[in-house]
Amino acid sequence: MIYSNRSIEREAMELYHGSERIVESPRFGAGKPHNDYGLGFYCTEHEDMAKEWAVGFDHDGYANRYAIDLEGLSVVDLDDQRYCTLHWLATLLQNRWFDVRSPIANEARGYLLKHFSVDFSGADVVEGNRADDSYFTFAQDFISGSISYRQLRNAMQLGSLGRQVMIRSERAFARMEFLGAQEVGRSVWLPRREQRDREARNRYFDVERNARRKGDLFIMQIIDEGMGPGDERLR
């Protein structure tokens, strides 16, 4: 396992959390354990993204706003140069359910967990890409051998979903300050979320999924050649 305690370049961060209710005091230990990076409080630095997350088919919501003091906190940033896309994927495999019924997908899961798992045990905050339904489709196709590593990385840029910030430890929760909440209407923000997802899927299936190139790396080659985190071909 790899653990990175990223040096903090900024001492504070402003975050947003989309919810169907106002969350003045986020609670340590609450929430669902099978989210992207495990149990924690998931936020974004982008207000519009929080508004999309806040609404559902049957409810409006709120974009809750916070400030957090990062000084002295341990932050794992999956976009750090020491990580690659396979670390992000291994993290999803640790925490979320994947369809691994095929022999290739099952072998890929085991290999990625063994060689690319990231240790979050000492982390106060985790940052990285968000895995919505579209991203999950891309990841599923990669571990089943349908698309290459290059195609996976390109596909992850299609939805412009941005990054998420997960508040993980009790001391990080204690650093959060509630700054207010804005009401969000589903009539505006649900269509925006659906359009973003639809555009990403359409571009993926129309272009990227069929854009194999000579020399592309597929999961079985990565496994057969024993590629690990230090392999330049994965950067």
Image (cartoon, rainbow, N blue to C red):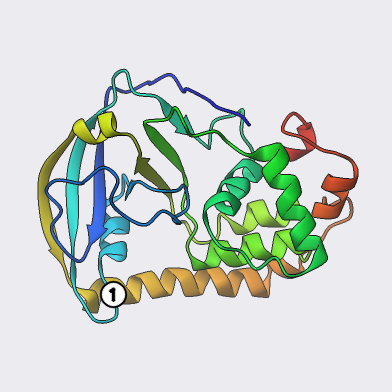
Q: Residues within 10 Å of mark 1 (few under 14, many from 20)?
A: some
Q: Which residue is mark 1?
A: 56
**Residue 205 spot, x, y in % from top left:** 65, 74
Look at 24% across and 36% down and name the residue there.
Answer: 173
Look at 80% across and 53% down and name the residue there.
Answer: 219
Comparing 89 with 149, the one in front is 89
**Residue 62 spot, x, y in % from top left:** 17, 61
Q: Quadrant of the N terminus?
A: top right
**Residue 126 spot, x, y in % from top left:** 42, 37
Comparing 85 with 96, the one in front is 96
For the residue labelled by badge 1, is the local secondary structure a helix, a strand or a loop? loop
Q: Is residue 73 above or below residue 44?
A: above
Any part of residue 218 in sight: no
**Residue 132 spot, x, y in % from top left:** 47, 62
Q: Is residue 155 left or right of residue 71?
A: right
Q: Is residue 84 left or right of residue 128?
A: right
Any part of residue 112 in sight: yes
Q: Is residue 143 above or below residue 190?
A: above
Q: Is residue 178 left or right of residue 105?
A: left
Look at 43% across and 68% down and name the residue there.
Answer: 196
